[in-house]
Image: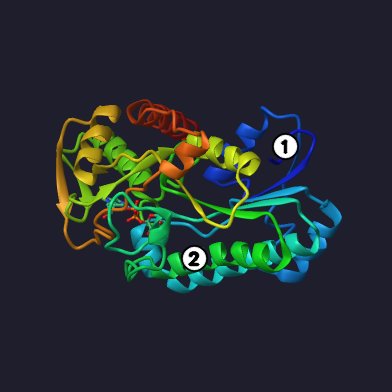
Amino acid sequence: MFEIADKRIWVCGHNGMVGRAVIRALHEYNCDILTVERQELDLTRQQNVEDWMEKAKPDAVIICAAKVGGVLANDTFPADFIYQNMSIETNIIHASYLCNVTKLIFLGSSCIYPKLADQPIKEEALLSGDLEQTNQWYAIAKIAGIKLCQAYRKQHGCDFISVMPTNLYGPHDNFDLDTSHVIPALIRKAHEAKSNEASTMTIWGSGKPFREFMHVDDCASGILFLLEHYSDYLHVNLGTGKDITIYDLALNIKQAVGFHGDIVCDLSKPDGTFRKCLDVSLLNNLGWQSKINFKDGLRETVNWFNKYMAEQS
Ligand code: GFB
């Protein structure tokens, strides 16, 4: 058991969607939240990370910092995804060992599992088959992060753990149509189609793949639960255990945005993995459950996006 109260907690990647949600959740605890801007600390530089941590002296580290993106961004920028993710996690994990950090949690992704894993996917499915080609670079980097935590636990006794969140959505997501994940992309597309009084909106691929989606505030709650209550070798899945097809997702988003036109599939764009729904029984048995209903979370995210767009204009 690690108590967050009264500790110095470094949230790396505090400007991203997950980092912001973790900080919102940490405000419920009486702890010191440490952050550092990218201009002050480049996490891909080992010596700089060690020097900064030596001065900051965190008790715990939450690694939300990562190079992330949707299916097309992963496929288009493989070097960025593998290099940046491997260097960020290696630097932070090694420096945390050198600085005697008491607890560290590393965030991976559900794409670490084999492309054809049995559904729902149990933690034990890791490295039991071939990866999905489009995001293998990111997946390999995230698998290396899990192995780093396990290696430092085995060799040095460090209490470093890993959590594998499913596909996330929520406020402060990346809404850029080329690099984003599907939910922010479709919210933006539906919003633009509605504003332009268009008759259709386009989705990538066949619309047939399934995805499991979790609100980022649920994710932050699960991360802090594990930080306090879990200290073991095996990585832990973090999700809802429920998935829907991309076509049904698009229908939900159309409804939440109020766009009444048709959905058109662009088959020149990748589908990615067909299905990757997590088995969350390990986390549930530890005593944590996801709470945010998908339709409520989606509506809240659409409202956030509408407000954000109004502020931009
Ligand atoms: O969210 P997404 O890019 O990530 O795509 P992945 C999910 C599904 O939505 C795919 C479809 O089947 C896409 O073809 N899709 C439909 C769209 N329309 C769109 C659109 O306009 N934009 C996008 N982006 N997708 C990523 C991985 O995979 O998920 C990462 O590449 C990471 O490594 C992340 O694991 C969570 O779920 O396919």
Mark earlier in primary sequence (1, 2):
1
- Name which residue lies at 48% across and 74% down: 79
- Residue 43: image quadrant is bottom right
Q: Position of residue 99 (x, y in %)?
A: 81, 60
> Which of 257 and 149 lies nearest the eye of the viewer?
149
Q: Is residue 43 visible?
A: no
Tell me the number on the disc at residue 143: 2
- Name which residue lies at 50% across and 34% down: 288
Q: Is mark 1 within 8 Å of ligand 1?
A: no
* Quadrant where the image shows the N terminus: top right
Q: How did the renderer colour the structure?
A: rainbow
The secondary structure type at the circle numbered 2 is helix
Tell me the number on the disc at residue 3: 1
Q: Position of residue 294 (x, y in %)?
A: 35, 31
- Name which residue lies at 19% across and 63% down: 268
Given the image, on which type of amino acid does mark 1 rest?
Glu
Packing grade of label 1 (10 A; few <14, some 14-19, many >=20) is: some
The count of marks equals: 2
